[in-house]
Each structure stands twice: as C-alpha cells, then as structure tokens.
Image (cartoon, rainbow, N blue to C red):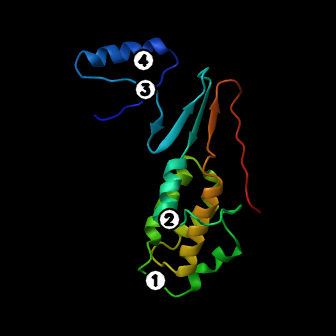
Amino acid sequence: MDDACLAATNESDIKEFVTHLKQTFEVKTEPLRFFLGAHVIISPDRRTISLTQTRYIEELLEKFQLENSKAIATPTDGGINTAYQAELNYDLPYRNLVGSINYISSYTHGDISYALSKLSRYLDKPTKPLYAAGLRVLKYLKTTKTFGPKYTADHAPTFVCYCEL
C-alpha cells in the first residue's frame, strides 16, 4: 500500500490502529494534506475540513492551454444547447476534457453539474462548439479554483446550493 487516510472520532483509536500496523509494516504518519487529488485543509482546532482542487485545475488549464485565458463568472452560456449541431470533429480531446470536468464536479465543484450534464450527452459526437463550451467550464473553474466544500463540526448539517437561471 502506498498511501492511506485514517479518520476517527477519537485520536486514541487512530494511534492504537497505527500501533498495530507498525507491528507488521513500516509506517510513516503525517497530517493529511492531499487526498485523491484534492488539497485538504484542516483548521488548527480540527473542527473544520475544507477541500479544494486548485492544483488539479491549474494543471488542466495548462494542459488545455488556458493558463493565460480570461477568467469568467459563469460555467455556461446559451450556446451549449445548440453546440451539438455543428460538424463533428473527432480530432478534439473532447472526451478527455469532459472526463476531467467530471472528476472536478463530483469532488469539489457541484456547481458545474448542469454544464457537465450537457457536455456528457455528446461524448460520441464532439464538435468545436461543444469543445469550446467545455473550455468555458475550465475558464469558469479558473475563477473558482479555490472554492470547495467545507465541513464543520460546529453546526448542524446544512446544504447550500447556487444555480444559474
């Protein structure tokens, strides 16, 4: 095993488990900083955990040559609804782009789910306008790359949703 993440309500449970592991394996422990591509930020009082995918988004911006692009405020515009009607272009890395967006959406950015659902419908029919719509989502993520879920132990669970009308 390469990496593992342990969590428990009592720190003593973690220490006991690690002690048992050390009897059989070489174990090195350190505070959690990254997990499955997300930056994990744990408050000093350990009552708040925040997740961001800033590094991954920056890597995607570079991969798709958008690191110097203008950041935008919304993930979609009206053009996404007709983008599939253009000429097919199988040379575009459309599936790769949509898959990358899917990973971000499912982990830290549920706010791009609508755009992702539209883009995902046409994975087998890539067009330049659809690809441009996917790139638009990345430009939006450039604006919101430090955003992500925040989990606190101080409040009752709440769910806040923002949507584009």
- As displayed, is residue 143 above or below residue 154? below
Q: Earlier in the sequence, mark 2 or mark 4?
A: 4
- As displayed, is residue 60 above or below residue 147? below
Q: Which image quarter holds the N terminus? A: top left
Q: CA distance from mark 1 to mark 2?
A: 15 Å
As drawn, is 97 to the left or to the right of 135?
Answer: left
Q: Earlier in the sequence, mark 3 or mark 4?
A: 3
| Amino acid identity at mark 1 | Asn
Q: CA distance from mark 1 to mark 3?
A: 45 Å
Q: Secondary structure at mark 3?
A: loop
Judge the density around disc 3: few (<14), some (14-19), many (≥20) Cα neighbours within 10 Å: few
Residue 29 x %, y %:
38, 23
Q: CA distance from mark 2 to mark 4?
A: 38 Å
Judge the density around disc 1: few (<14), some (14-19), many (≥20) Cα neighbours within 10 Å: few
As drawn, is 68 to the left or to the right of 124?
Answer: right
What residue does disc 1 label?
A: 89
Q: Earlier in the sequence, mark 2 or mark 3?
A: 3
Evaluate if marks 2 and 3 touch, with contact meaning CB atoms under 8 Å apart: no
What residue does disc 3 label?
A: 6
Instruction: In the displayed orientation, state which residue is furthest to the front.
Output: 68
In front here: 82 or 76? 76
| Amino acid identity at mark 4 | Ile
Residue 113 x %, y %:
61, 58
What residue does disc 2 label?
A: 98
Evaluate if marks 4 and 1 touch, with contact meaning CB atoms under 8 Å apart: no
Q: Residue at x 52, y 36 (%)?
A: 40
Q: Residue at x 51, y 57 (%)?
A: 102
Q: Earlier in the sequence, mark 1 or mark 2?
A: 1
Judge the density around disc 4: few (<14), some (14-19), many (≥20) Cα neighbours within 10 Å: some
Residue 67 x %, y %:
55, 62
| Amino acid identity at mark 2 | Val
